[in-house]
Image (cartoon, coloured by chain):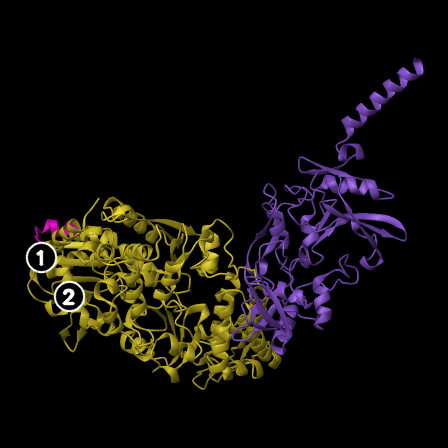
Chain colours: A purple, B yellow
Amino acid sequence: MANVTITIDSKKVTVPSGTFIIEAAKEVGIEIPALCYDPNLEVVGACRLCLVEVEGSRKLQTACSTKVWDGMVVHTRSERVVKARKEILQLLLDNHPNDCLTCQKAGECLLQKYAYEYDVKFREHDGDRRPALVDTSSPYILKDDSKCILCGKCVRTCAQVADRQVLTFANRGFNTRIVADIDLSLEESSCVSCNRCVTVCPVGALLDKRLMGKGRPWEFEIKEVKCKVCEYGCDFEVLSRNGKNVAVRAKAPSNGRPLCLKGRLTTEFIYLDEPYTPYKKENGEFKETTWKEALGLDNIIEKLLDKEEISTGVEYNG
Amino acid sequence: MMTVEELRKIKEETLKHMESKLYKLDKEKIGQKATNRHVLICGGPGCYSSNVEEIKERFVEKIAEKGLENVEVSISGCFGLCESGPNIEIYPDGTFYSRIKIEDVDEIVEKHLCQNEIVERLLNEDAKKEDKILPVHQVDFYKKQEKIALRNCGIIDYNSIEEYIALDGYHALAKVLTEMDRGEVIEVMKKSNLRGRGGAGFPTGRKWETAYKYEADKKYVICNADEGDPGAFMDRSILEGDPHSVLEGMAICGYAVGSDQGYIYIRAEYPVAVKRLRTAIKQAREKGLLGKNILGTGFNFDIELRLGAGAFVCGEGTALMESIEGRRGMPRPKVERTAHKGLWGKPTIINNVETFANVAPIILKGADWFRSIGTEDSPGTKVFALGGKVKNTGLVEVPMGTTLREIIFDIGGGTVGGKKFKAVQTGGPSGGCIPEEFLDTPVDFASLSKIGSIMGSGGMIVLDESDCMVDIARFFLDFTVDESCGKCVPCREGTKRMLEILERITEGEGTPEDLDRLESLAEIITSSSLCGLGQTAANPVVSTLKYFREEYEAHVYEKRCPAGSCQALLQYFITDKCIGCTKCARNCPVSAISGKVKEKHVIDTETCIKCGACMEACPVGAIIKK
């Protein structure tokens, strides 16, 4: 594909034609804020935060869905752009609980990051808010609807694995929510706890429950490891605090990697100093289980022990 | 399979039976002798729901009973004047009867049909002027109308493909298939400058050309029949009254752009339209006018219906396509043009019902003919659904450039009950309110947008002095909030906040800051929303703030509703007319009224709960609210 040269905030950059502005900007180190954009997911243009000014266009354009053309001149931080972003962030904060003090996502939350960057604050108002629905049914995922900003990343990433497609939008307008299947709890639903959704959620609406209370993001040392369960080799992060490995979390499900619970549990078992209790879903109910069973090793271990005992026996008796 | 020759034969055969009702098209002939007489019953949405099927049956029975010959009775599409329905026209005289009940049928047959005596009490009130009885085309409502999209509505029997063919139906399709190459069709459409009737007014020919020039193994034609503006029913009327005109327009489009598959996306709330479309599609297939090898020319084109679940946002092209694809109806960002990558990623033409209904006449009569109607910028006609506080509510088709005043006063008959005209709301929830000072604005795409409104799909709601403009803005925003899909932040969150402010203001709890907040919200919602629904959602608020700011201010600063419509801001008073009968005081449930017998009473406005019981009880009309 032919290359085109465009100017972003006075910086010239040459990229293949057909590149989206948001990606072209990255090439010259300009980060355009976006809550719903993820290069691995279908572009939806929902959050409208990546609006930029393109010379010659009357309207502001979303950098995530506008392709570059030769000679394009883009302003990513003009007065008009900044004003629009502030308004959008304010609309989001007006419908978001003021819970950053104790929210597990604090420090990694994109909404928090952009609100700080654009100096937008929570404010008192007596208008409607999202209902405080918290799904605590899963031992792996905490789903807090009140914090959801409806970017839809979770829905899109869930849909990328053909036989999952658990999460979906329900209702519409201000009452839109993300639900599992036909608005079931995560426990009752067909969710397999792969945590793809958790890895893409930009806010604290979908959290890894096994991480909660284990520390603040800035306290962790992070080591990336590859899962050894299958040939996909998904990426996981081992989080350690004060020299102790305290949690394992799934990294972004990039490049067609499915992520799965078994892989995550196995990684937990391998790396964590004190692995937590594993749970298994049976007939729509989570039940405590043994590591043997959680990792699918019960038969193998018995057979292994059996074999070793026999062979040991033979040696001793012989 | 039918040939062009057979098409012409059907036309000739059918015309014989239609003689007198065709006088409706040829005004010179009205009143002249004809070989038959025709009782034409309006089957538009309003009349149809008033049992016109039974009325027709009664006519047929009674006519048989009287042994009358050569009298045909049929139900056709919408006549337009819904206000006075059910409507009946009798040809060759063009007699216009209104508000017909089943009990009236016998009298019409006995007097009008048997004795040629007009039943004056049943005449439409405007069909009588100074003792003269006017034929229907001379009635004020119809005088200035010119029909292209609705050309067959009110004449042909919607269930008869033959009658459609008789009025040159499918002749335009035959013409393009046998006499024109695809490029020529595009050229005619471009030259006609037919602009999209769904609201945005994009030139149809240019849209078709984009898809025509784009190579692809499959292309689609979609008819957007997801009409959803409150009070708008022009698309419905076309689909119910003349379904073949839409099918033919789509087939011509399919030929021009190189598509063999069309979809009509229609809301399931239009069951009558769905039924008539199904019948029409079946008939067209049977006659070989849809399907494979149409008219023996090798051209294939078929049409399927897709029923929408009634989400307003699905009128937005990309959301509509998502819905057809089986996904949740949410708009997608236009990374590519839909004429390049639309439905299932294939080049797709999406036009509105009324746009397609205009296609066949343009092909038959030429682009120059079309351009001779309407204005340079907006040629042709436009159908409007006239409603609200206007005398003649109904469906109106006028040349573009007709002024609002002509539509509302000359055709619509002005406001009702001597109330003062205040504004007209055009374009539904995406449009704006236009005040009296702009009544002489010609109705075309550019002029309406210049004064802060839009053509939209053609809703036109007349407001009078008793309508509160803040409340009107609230009404439309309430609709938008309800219909927002929830995908993008400004529309989902912003419209809700605007609505909350408007509710506060109409309840007398608005603050001066609320007015500023409304303006800044309007700006962000308009400039940053994903789709047309959001981008235009603030229009009702912006236009009322612009032209009726003093009403907002009266609500905010004086806690007063000048139109006397916002219940929370009304106060009841007793005027000097009071005769001191004590009736009001006795009826007040909260004892807010005091006064001595035969002396003027007083309402304690603090205690008053504004129930209106006193007003109802007062025998002399001494109690007012303001």
Q: Is residue B540 left or right of residue A122?
A: left
Q: Chain of mark 2?
A: B
Is residue B551 visible to the viewer in this orientation of the structure?
yes
Type of amino acid under label 1: Asn
Type of amino acid under label 2: Gly
Q: Is residue B310 left or right of residue B512?
A: left
Tell me which residue sits at (78%, 35%) in the image.
A289
Relative to residue A103, is residue A159 depicted above or below?
Answer: above
Report which quarter residue A19 is drawn in. bottom right
Near-viewer residue (B249 or A92)? B249
Which element is circle 1 on?
loop
Q: Chain of mark 1?
A: B
> Is A160 within the magenta?
no
Near-viewer residue (B25 or B349)? B349
Near-viewer residue (B511 or B431)? B431
Relative to residue A74, is residue B150 depicted above or below?
Answer: above
* CA–CA distance in space, label 1 to label 2: 13 Å
Magenta stretch, residue numbers: B60-70
Task: Give the numbered dot on residue B305.
Answer: none
Is residue B503 visible to the viewer in this orientation of the structure?
no
Task: Give the numbered dot on residue B36.
Answer: 1
Q: In x, y percent, where is residue B536?
A: 48, 70
Q: In x, y percent, where is residue B560?
A: 53, 81
Q: Which residue is mark 2?
A: B94
